[in-house]
Amino acid sequence: MTTQNNERRPKVFVSGCYDMLHSGHVAFFKEASQYGDLYVGIGSDSTIEELKSRKPIYSERERLYMVKAIRYVTDAWINRGSGIMDFVATVDMVKPDVFVVNSDGGNETKRKFCEERGIKYVVLERRPDRGLEARSTTSLRTEVSSQLPYRLDLAGTWIDQPYVSQLHPGWALTISLEPIEEYMERGGMSTSTRNSARKLWPYQLPNYNEEMLARLLFCFENEPEKDKGYISGAQDAIGICMSGLNRHYYDNTYWPSKIESVNDEETLSWLEIHLCLVPMFPRRPGSSVVKNSDVTPEKVKALADAADRCWQAIRAHDLKAFAEAFQASFDAQIAMFPAMVAEGVEEYIEKYRPCSLAHKLAGAGGGGYLALVIDGALPEGAHPLKIRRKDSV
């Protein structure tokens, strides 16, 4: 739209969250700016949480910075209202001549709002700029993989449950894994806790204190009243949120009394060389890994002792001692919870026994992944793993 030099250009207003700013947004701004000087209202962090039931990817300050940097935008503000009509106060401040929406963002309420204020209401069809693919936030959310880590428990599994550690205290050992592949659900890789984490942080962990992130995730995931007293072990949240190798000490508590971390490159690389995962099958629906459990002080002590030896062997890069302790930890687990070795698991164990130094089931078992300690080439059908380094968050 063109005007004479002595005439005021019309004011054009658009509003949205713009949380995953993409070429579709820029094309929309470009087309809307043809109607006059473009002003943008941006949904606040609280509005995004209310409307989308998730936290924003980028804070409102970051989104404001990015939108204002686009050359088609004259100015922008954070809307201070709430809900789908959060822009009312911003519109009353800007006093636009034209209100522009995308075809999937318009509604009768917005049209009547503009009619009451004498604002021209314009609906644009979504169309990418020449040579570009059509983009929408929804499509990006379904196409872009989450970069949240997984966790692999190395030793001491089950000690993070108070009904176990009350009989003898001990350490659980975990490593945080980069998502170099999408691990199966119900496979012992803490996917349920990871799915809870995605509600807080859809794509990646915040750059924040790792232990605090683990505490937040643990508290977010567990609702004792809703879950009738069942508490997901703290090792899951710690293994996801705390990079590198960690051990955490439990003594009849849900949260460990102390955590020790190893992030030196030599140790993490050594573990990557000597560990791999074999995919089996998901834990079967309705199966119970705690069926016929036999948890005694002697068996819990054996679990705790094996985990301690495992830690010492890793720190010393002693492969023989590591394999022995790794196997002893798993043997202690299945002595207490024999149902971890569900039907079909033993076949995988026997297949990989000749080409590995030790083995265990990831997580609570019942299926999922078989973790192997190896010395040499990767066995056929096994997958390497990548431990998350501290500076990768």
Image (tube, helix red, strand yellow):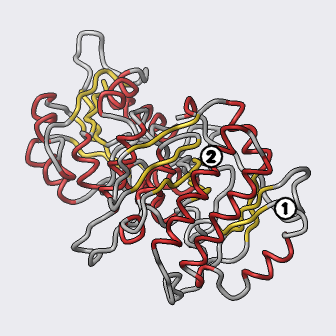
Vertical position of residue 40 compared to residue 373: above or below:
above
Label 1 to label 2: alpha-carbon separation: 23 Å
Amino acid marked by disc 2: Glu
Query: Residue at point 17% right, 57% down?
Result: 109
Q: Position of residue 100 (x, y in %)?
A: 30, 42
Pointer 1 local density, CA inside 10 Å: few below 14, some 14–19, many at least 20:
many
Q: Is residue 126 visible?
A: no
Instruction: State the count of labels.
Output: 2
Name the spot of residue 75 as percent of width and height, x first. Answer: 28, 22
Instruction: Say which residue label 1 marks.
Output: 356
* Position above or below: 91 against 336: above
Specify the quadrant of the image occupied by residue 185.
bottom right
The correct choice, above or below, for 147 with respect to 350 in the image is above
Say which of 300 and 130 sits in front.
300
Q: Nearer the viewer, mark 1 or mark 2?
A: 1
| Residue drawn at 33 percent across, 62 percent down | 252
The percent position of residue 297, horizontal first and vertical second, equals 45, 72
Q: Is residue 79 left or right of residue 368?
A: left
Q: Is residue 188 left or right of residue 125?
A: right
Q: What SS does tag 1 mark?
A: loop
Disc number for residue 41? none
Q: Where in the figure is residue 344, as x and y percent of width and height? A: 73, 85
Q: Earlier in the sequence, mark 1 or mark 2?
A: 2
- In the image: residue 207, left or right of residue 4: right
Disc 1 residue type (three-letter): Ser
177 and 158: which one is in front? 158
**Visible in this render: residue 200?**
yes
Q: Residue at x 72, y 31 (%)?
A: 266
Q: Secondary structure at mark 2?
A: loop
Q: State the residue at coordinates (34%, 48%).
A: 215
The residue labelled by disc 2 is 178
